[in-house]
Image: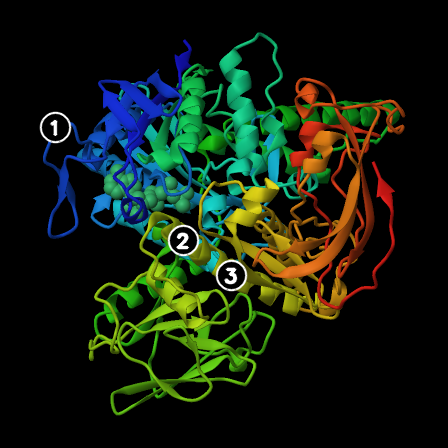
C-alpha cells in the first residue's frame, strides 16, 4: 500500500535581529492550515501538522520553553506527533525518514536535535527507543541491535562525522543493486547499546562537524547532516526456535539552508555554473517536483546529486517519510518562507511504498557462509581426483567444479541479500573510545580548569570545542599526522593563517598571559591584534588566525575585563572585531541595523578570503566598501531599495592598484569557489604553494578582469533632444563616494531607425509631437579620461528607443594607476 509523505510546518519565535528591526509577523495558523500574508495578499496551505511555536510560551529558569497557551507547540508535542510516528514504524520494521527543510536560521536544527534542555525529535526519540527496548529486557524471545552513523554532505562530498580521519574527496557513494539503494562506502557505523551511547555519538559527530566548519569558516549552513540509526528487532519463535528479524533504517536529515541563489544576490550565469553552490538541494527540489507530478514512467533524477542518491528510499521508495518545514515568522523573509511552503506543499504529493523488512536471522546467514567457505576450500584443490586419472574421470571433476562454482555464486548472492542481518559495526573502536574519553574528560574539567571554548555563528556548533590550559606553558599551533609527534603543540588548531608556532599561553601565580608565537602569527584579544604578552581574563575573546574564534574561560577567577557585557556571544565578538577595524557598529535605525548586519556577515568572510589569497599567492586583497545607495539606485544596480549606505566588497590587485567593486552575491559565490580550490589544494600539505599564482583566467575566482562594475555616473541633461537637436559635451564621472573619477565625452545625435541622419527636411515644431512616437538617437563616446572605456552597455543595435536613455552608462573600470586617455569613438 502506498503512503503519502507526511508534512509538518513549524514557525519559530522572532530572533533578536528580527526584533531589532521591528519585524512584522507574516504567518498565521488555524488548525492544520498555515496562512502567509504579504503585499500580494494571503496564501493558504494545508498540512498534516501546523505547529505554532512563535509565541504563547515562557522560558523557565533552566532554559526550558514551556507553553502558556495551548496554541504553542513545544518540543514534546512535536515529538509526540512525529517522533512517535517514527518509532512506531521503526518498531514494526519499516524504514523511516524524517527530514527538516527551511532557510538558514528557520529552526531546522532546533526541531531535529534541539538546544540544551529543549531537546529535539532526535534525542527524545532515541531515548524512547531505548526505553521501549528496556521494557523487553526480561523477554528471552526478543533481542535488539542498534547502530549509528552520522555523515555530512558538503559540496557534493560525503564526510564521516564519527571520525576525524576523512580522506580527500570524501567517501564514495555506490549503488548496491542487491539492495536497490545507494550506500556510502567505509562509513563508520557504531554499535550503540544505550541512549547514553547515542548521545556520545552525536556529541562526537557535532564536535567533528565544528572542527571541519572552523577550518573552512562557517560553512555549516551549506551542509546536509544525515544521522542513520539502524534498528533491528529479533524475535524467536517459541515452537520452532526459528529467529526472525525486523529491521528498520531511520534516517534523520537536517538539510542545508534552503536560500535560493537569487536571494544571496548571486549574479552572472558564469558564476552560477562555475560554482555549484548546492547541487544536492536543487536536485532534491527536482526529485520532489518529479515525484509530486506522479507521472508513470517519469524519470526521477535521483542520481544527479549525492543527497538524492542517499535519500532515494526516503523519497518514493521503501520508507515512511515525514518532512518538517521550518518557517521564519518575519515578513522580511516572506519570499523564502513562501518558497518553503510551496516546497512542503509539493512534498505532500509524494507517495512511498514502505514494506516491513523482515527475514530469518543471522543463524541462517552464518550457516550459508560456512557452506560457501567449505565449498570454496574444496574448490581450492581438495576435490578428490578419480583414481587412475583417466580422461572420463577428469571430465567429471570439471563438471563438479562448475557445479560447485554455480552453487557458491548462488549462496553468496543469497547471503548478500540477507546482508542486513550481519553485525553492522564498522570502523575503528579505538578512535571512538579515544574521542569519547576526551569528551568525558572535558566535561569533568570544565568547571575547574581554565580553557578556551569555541564561538560559532551556527548555534548548533557554538561552544562545542574546549582546549584546556594545563601546566605552565601551553603551545598553540598547527600540526599534522605526518609531522613528528614530539613537535605536536598542546593545542592543535587548523584552518587559515594558523602557524606552526602560533601562540603561547603562560600560567603563573594564577595569572594567564598569551603571546604571539612569531611576528607573522596573528592573534587578536578582544578584537585587537597582540604583539606582546597580554593578560587574559575570564570571557575575553581570542581569535587565532582568521577563523578560530574562542572565548577564554577562567572558572577560578571569573572576573571579566572592563567593558565585557554579561553575555558574550559570536555576534558580540564579531562586532568587536569590526569596531576595532574602524567600523561604526552603533546604528539604531533599521537601515543602519541592516548595514551592521551586512558588515558582521562580510568581515569574517573577507578576512578568510584574504588569508586564502595570501596563502595561494594571489596578490589580490579584498576590503569592505561602503557605497552610497543613491549611486546604486541611479544606476539601477541596487537590489534593495534603501536610503542608506550599502555594503559592497572592493577587490584590489596589489601590483597594479586596480580595483573592482563586487556586490554581496558575487562575492559570496566567488568565496565559495575560493574555498573549494583552497580545500582541494590544502589537503596535500606537500604541494607547492604557488600552484595557482596570480589569477589568469575566468575560471579562477580570484580573476577579476571580467567583472563589470559601476565606475560612477555622469549626469547628462538631454533637453536638446526634445527639439531634435544634437549636442555633445564633457561630463564628470562621479564615483560611489561622490568623488570625481574621470571624465567622458559623449555626443547625442537624433537619427533614423537605421542610424542614418535625420532627413534634411525633418522639422519638429513642438516636442509634444514626439509623444507616442519611436525616437532614435545615436550616442557617441569621444573619449574617457582616467578610465579605460572597454565596453558599454548600450544596445548594440544601430539605434535604440528613447526610453533606453534612462539606462546608466557603465564601464569596466580600472582605477588605480591612471591610464592614458584613449580616443575611442563608439557610436551606436
Ligand atoms: N521553535 C523554536 N522555539 C524557540 N527557538 C527556536 C525555535 N526554532 C528555532 N529557534 C531558535 O532559532 C535559532 C535558529 O534555529 P536553528 O539553528 O534551529 O536554525 P536552522 O534552520 O537549523 O539554521 P541552519 O540552517 O543555520 O542550521 C536558534 O537560536 C534556535 O534556538
Residue 468, x across and y down, in percent: 34, 74
The residue to which callout 3 is attached is 215
The residue to which callout 1 is attached is 70
User: Viewed as shown, does residue 282 lie left or right of 769?
Assistant: left
The residue to which callout 2 is attached is 597
The quarter of the picture showing ligand 1: top left
Q: Nearer the viewer, mark 2 or mark 3?
A: 2
Q: Are there few (<14), some (14-19), or many (20+) residues within 10 Å of tag 3?
A: some
The CA span between labels 1 and 2 is: 35 Å
Secondary structure beneath dot 3 equals helix
Q: Residue furthest bottom?
A: 509
Q: Earlier in the sequence, mark 1 or mark 3?
A: 1
Q: Nearer the viewer, mark 1 or mark 3?
A: 1
Relative to residue 511, is residue 20 depicted above or below?
A: above
User: Viewed as shown, does residue 513 lie left or right of 756?
Assistant: left
Quadrant including the C terminus: top right
Q: Are marks 2 and 3 in contact (CB under 8 Å)?
A: no
Name the residue nearer the viewer: 665 or 645. 645
Q: Residue furthest front?
A: 765
Q: Earlier in the sequence, mark 2 or mark 3?
A: 3
Secondary structure beneath dot 2 equals helix
Residue 727, x across and y down, in percent: 78, 41
Name the residue nearer the viewer: 490 or 15. 15
Q: Is mark 2 within 8 Å of ligand 1?
A: no
Q: Are there few (<14), some (14-19), or many (20+) residues within 10 Å of tag 2?
A: some
The CA span between labels 1 and 3 is: 44 Å
Residue at image position (50%, 84%) is 517
User: Viewed as shown, does residue 125 lie left or right of 380?
Assistant: left
Would residue 250 be visible to someone looking at this image? no
Amino acid at each position: 500500500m502506498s503512503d503519502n509523505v507526511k508534512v509538518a510546518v513549524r514557525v519559530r519565535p522572532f530572533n533578536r535581529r528580527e526584533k531589532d528591526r521591528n519585524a512584522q509577523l507574516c504567518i498565521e495558523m488555524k488548525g492544520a492550515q498555515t496562512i502567509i500574508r504579504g503585499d500580494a495578499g494571503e496564501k493558504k496551505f494545508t498540512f498534516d501538522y501546523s505547529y505554532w511555536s512563535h509565541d504563547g510560551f515562557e522560558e523557565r529558569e533552566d532554559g526550558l520553553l514551556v507553553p502558556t497557551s495551548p496554541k504553542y507547540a513545544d518540543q514534546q508535542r512535536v515529538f509526540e506527533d512525529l517522533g512517535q510516528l517514527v518509532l512506531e514504524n521503526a518498531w514494526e520494521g519499516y524504514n523511516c525518514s524524517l527530514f527538516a527543510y527551511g532557510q538558514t536560521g528557520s529552526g531546522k536544527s532546533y526541531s531535529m536535535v534541539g538546544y540544551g534542555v529543549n531537546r529535539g525529535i532526535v534525542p527524545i526519540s532515541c531515548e524512547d527507543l531505548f526505553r521501549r527496548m528496556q521494557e523487553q529486557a526480561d523477554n528471552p524471545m526478543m533481542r535488539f541491535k542498534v547502530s549509528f552513523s552520522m555523515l555530512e554532505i558538503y559540496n557534493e562530498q560525503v564526510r564521516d562525522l564519527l571520525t576525524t580521519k576523512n580522506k580527500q574527496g570524501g567517501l564514495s557513494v555506490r549503488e548496491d543493486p542487491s539492495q536497490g539503494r545507494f550506500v556510502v562506502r567505509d562509513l563508520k557505523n557504531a554499535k550503540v547499546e544505550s541512549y547514553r551511547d547515542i548521545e556520545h555519538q552525536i556529541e562526537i559527530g557535532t564536535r567533528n562537524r565544528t572542527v571541519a566548519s572552523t577550518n573552512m569558516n562557517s560553512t555549516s549552513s551549506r551542509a546536509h547532516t544525515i544521522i542513520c540509526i539502524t534498528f533491528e528487532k529479533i524475535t524467536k519463535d517459541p515452537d520452532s526456535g526459528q529467529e526472525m528479524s525486523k529491521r528498520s533504517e531511520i534516517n534523520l536529515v537536517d538539510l542545508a539552508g534552503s536560500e535560493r541563489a537569487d536571494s544571496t544576490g548571486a549574479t552572472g550565469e558564469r558564476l552560477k555554473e562555475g560554482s555549484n553552490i548546492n547541487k544536492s538541494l536543487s536536485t532534491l527540489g527536482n526529485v520532489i517536483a518529479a515525484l509530486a507530478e506522479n507521472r508513470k514512467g517519469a524519470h526521477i533524477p535521483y542520481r544527479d546529486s549525492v543527497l538524492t542518491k542517499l535519500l532515494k528510499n526516503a523519497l518514493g521508495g521503501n520508507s515512511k517519510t515525514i518532512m518538517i518545514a521550518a518557517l521564519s515568522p518575519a515578513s522580511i523573509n516572506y519570499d523564502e518562507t513562501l518558497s518553503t511552503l510551496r516546497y512542503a506543499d509539493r512534498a505532500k504529493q509524494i507517495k512511498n511504498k514502505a514494506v516491513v523488512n523482515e527475514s530469518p536471522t543471522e543463524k541462517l546467514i552464518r550457516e550459508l557462509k560456512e557452506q560457501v567457505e567449505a565449498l570454496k576450500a574444496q574448490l581450492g584443490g581438495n576435490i578428490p581426483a578419480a583414481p587412475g586419472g583417466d580422461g572420463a574421470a577428469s571430465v567429471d571433476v570439471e563438471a563438479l567444479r562448475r557445479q560447485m562454482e554455480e552453487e557458491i555464486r548462488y549462496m553468496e548472492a543469497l547471503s548478500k541479500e540477507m546482508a542486513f542481518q550481519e553485525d553492522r559495526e564498522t570502523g575503528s573502536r579505538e578512535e571512538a573510545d579515544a574521542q569519547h574519553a576526551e569528551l568525558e574528560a572535558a566535561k569533568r574539567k570544565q568547571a575547574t580548569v581554565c580553557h578556551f571554548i569555541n564561538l560559532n555563528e551556527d548555534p548548533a556548533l557554538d561552544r562545542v570545542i574546549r582546549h584546556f590550559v594545563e601546566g605552565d606553558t601551553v603551545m598553540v599551533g598547527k600540526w599534522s599526522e605526518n609531522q613528528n609527534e614530539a613537535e605536536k603543540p598542546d593545542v592543535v588548531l587548523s584552518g587559515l593563517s594558523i602557524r606552526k608556532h602560533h601562540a603561547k599561553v603562560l600560567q603563573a601565580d594564577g595569572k594567564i598571559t598569551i603571546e604571539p608565537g612569531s611576528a607573522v602569527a596573528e592573534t587578536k584579544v578582544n578584537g585587537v591584534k597582540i604583539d606582546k604578552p597580554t593578560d587574559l581574563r575570564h570571557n575575553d575573546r581570542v581569535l587565532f588566525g582568521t577563523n578560530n574564534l574562542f572565548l577564554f574561560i577562567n572558572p577560578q577567577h571569573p572576573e571579566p575585563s572592563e567593558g565585557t557585557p554579561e553575555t558574550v556571544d559570536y555576534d558580540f565578538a564579531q562586532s568587536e572585531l569590526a569596531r576595532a577595524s574602524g567600523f561604526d557598529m552603533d546604528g539604531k535605525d533599521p537601515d543602519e541595523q541592516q548595514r551592521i548586519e551586512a558588515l558582521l556577515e562580510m568581515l569574517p568572510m573577507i578576512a578568510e578570503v584574504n588569508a586564502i589569497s595570501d596563502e595561494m599567492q594571489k596578490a589580490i586583497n579584498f576590503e569592505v566598501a561602503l557605497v552610497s545607495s543613491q549611486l546604486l539606485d541611479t544606476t539601477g544596480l541596487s537590489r534593495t531599495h534603501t536610503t542608506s549606505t550599502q555594503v559592497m566588497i572592493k577587490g584590489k590587485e596589489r601590483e597594479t592598484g586596480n580595483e573592482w567593486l563586487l556586490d554581496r552575491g558575487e562575492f559570496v559565490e566567488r568565496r565559495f569557489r575560493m574555498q573549494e580550490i583552497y580545500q582541494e589544494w590544502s589537503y596535500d600539505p606537500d604541494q607547492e604553494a604557488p600552484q595557482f599564482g596570480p589569477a589568469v583566467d575566468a575560471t579562477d575566482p580570484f580573476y577579476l578582469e571580467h567583472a563589470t562594475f559601476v565606475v560612477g555616473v555622469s549626469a547628462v541633461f538631454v533637453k536638446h533632444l526634445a527639439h531634435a537637436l544634437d549636442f555633445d559635451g564633457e561630463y564628470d564621472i562621479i564615483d560611489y563616494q561622490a568623488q570625481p573619477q574621470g571624465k567622458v565625452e559623449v555626443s547625442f545625435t537624433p537619427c533614423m531607425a537605421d542610424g542614418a541622419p535625420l532627413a534634411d527636411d525633418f522639422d519638429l515644431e513642438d516636442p509634444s509631437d514626439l509623444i507616442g512616437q519611436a525616437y532614435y538617437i545615436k550616442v557617441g563616446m569621444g573619449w574617457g579620461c582616467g578610465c579605460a572605456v572597454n565596453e558599454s552597455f548600450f544596445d548594440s543595435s544601430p539605434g535604440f528607443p528613447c526610453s533606453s536613455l534612462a539606462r546608466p552608462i557603465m564601464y569596466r573600470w580600472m582605477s588605480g594607476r591612471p591610464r592614458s586617455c584613449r580616443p575611442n569613438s563608439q557610436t551606436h
